[in-house]
Amino acid sequence: MSRLRVYREDQPDAPQTIEDHPAIAAALADIGVRFERWTADAELGPDAGQDEVVAAYKGDIDRLMEQMGFQSYDVIALRPDHPDKTTLRKKFLDEHTHSEFEIRFFVDGAGQFNLHKDGKVFEVTCERGDLISVPEGTRHWFDMGPNPSFKCIRFFTNPEGWVANFTGDDIAQRFPRFE
């Protein structure tokens, strides 16, 4: 289930919890984060590849590409049996920013984005059907969990793809992990 927990940055043990999708979208919109629910135009099997995924979400992909000026997109998947899952998880766990929007649409599975803004941490658990757009310059980290299981469409304006600017702040170490 999609969920938003809002913490004060100095109180990682006392969150406000929101589980209603429209209420999550409204709360995130207040900090400039887009949160949408998409529905596939076709049923996808667990082994659906990039071409099948793109065909199933083509209308939403085209709309977002036009609205946001993206240059490319791809489909990424990670499963619990991936041999480098621990290394890949660690790569995203430190707080960082990007010089472009980071947009992920969860075709399958789940993950947790943590956004650090205005003295608060917004912990967003995204699941199948959720799209999240983290604005450029927003301090955040992502946790895929110790046994990652997700398939996402990623959108890019930067031809180099995912480029992180790490903040050096250890705040991500003080907040709950996606387990």
Image (spheres, rainbow, N blue to C red):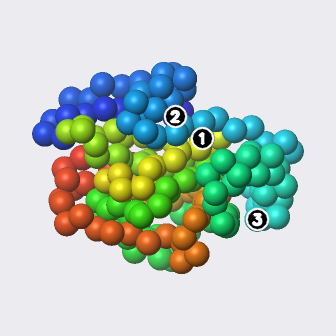
Residues marked 3 and 1 touching at CB (< 8 Å)? no
Q: Residue at x 81, y 51 (%)?
A: 58
Name which residue type carries label 3.
Gln
All told, the count of numbered labels is: 3
Residue 62 at x, y = what percent?
A: 76, 51
Name which residue type carries label 2.
Ser
Q: Which mark is residue 2?
A: 2
CA gap, disc 2 and disc 1: 8 Å
* Badge 3 or badge 1: first in the primary sequence: 3
CA gap, disc 3 and disc 1: 18 Å
* Badge 2 or badge 3: first in the primary sequence: 2
Kind of element beneath mark 3: helix
Q: Residue at x 64, y 57 (%)?
A: 69
Residues marked 2 and 1 touching at CB (< 8 Å)? yes
Q: Residue at x 44, y 72 (%)?
A: 163
Q: Which mark is residue 62?
A: none
Graded by Cα atoms within 10 Å as few (under 14), some (14 to 19) or many (20 or more), the crowding at tag 1 reads many
Name which residue type carries label 1.
Asp
Check the image and name the residue furthest to the left.
10
When the figure is inspected, residue 80 is found, relative to residue 13, above or below; the finding is below
Kind of element beneath mark 1: strand
Graded by Cα atoms within 10 Å as few (under 14), some (14 to 19) or many (20 or more), the crowding at tag 3 reads some
Q: Which residue is mark 3?
A: 50
Q: Is residue 31 visible?
A: yes
Q: Residue at x 80, y 46 (%)?
A: 59
Position of residue 140 in the picture relative to residue 85 (left or right): left
Residue 165 at x, y = what percent?
A: 33, 69
Q: Which residue is mark 1?
A: 130
When the figure is inspected, residue 173 is found, relative to residue 37, above or below; the finding is below
Q: Nearer the viewer, residue 37 or 138?
A: 138
